[in-house]
Amino acid sequence: VASFLEAFHFKHANECENKDGSGLSPLVCAVVAGCATVARDLIGHHGADINCRIRWGDASVGLPTGCSPLAGAMACCPRERADEMIMMLLRAGADPNRTLAAGVTPLMAAIPYHNLATMSAPLLPIMPI
């Protein structure tokens, strides 16, 4: 985690937003980079806010204004790591109904970027067989 924070110019693990560096929270950066180990450590050992929201976004890469870690995982996380990241965030308490600045949910934010399997991953544990 220390090298990750240093690479992204964060002073501490629960920094809300770093204006001198990436402009994102450490947790959102870890999530969109697909770094599940770092994200898990930020949540479990450093108290990162699972429902934090970034103040600005970049729609060209799928990060809408007000993006949460869960929305970042659903829209931007590398596809081969998205399911693991989404499930880890949900198990840690991420709110799938918390809307982004534009009033959309993480699932709605993901529609243009991922396939049906990735978007439905959060629903699998609650769907009847």
Image (spheres, grey):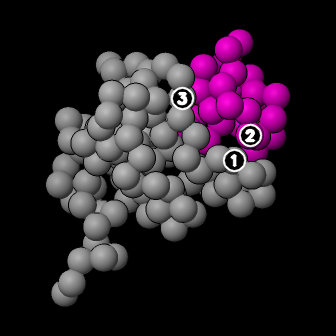
Residue at (28, 67) in percent of width and height = 123
Residue 3: name its quadrant: top right
Instruction: Find residue 14 and name its label.
Output: 2
Rendered view: 67 above or below 78: above
Secondary structure of residue under mark 3: loop
Q: Residue beneath label 3, please?
A: 54
Residue 84: name its quadrant: bottom left
Residue at (33, 28) in percent of width and height = 102
Tell me if label 1 and label 3 are in contact, CB under 8 Å: no
Q: Position of residue 32 (x, y in %)?
A: 48, 38
Q: Quadrant of the C terminus?
A: bottom left
> Mark 1 is on which residue type?
Ala
Secondary structure of residue under mark 2: loop
**Which residue is outermost to the top?**
20
Q: Is residue 78 visible?
A: no
Q: Quadrant of the N terminus?
A: top right
Instruction: Find residue 48 and name its label.
Output: 1
Instruction: Find residue 104 and name its label.
Output: none
Residue at (59, 50) in percent of width and height = 50
Q: Residues within 10 Å of mark 1 (few under 14, many from 20)?
A: many
Q: Position of residue 23 (x, y in %)?
A: 60, 20
Magenta-tinted stretch? 1-29
Q: Which comes sooner in the sequence, label 2 or label 3? A: 2
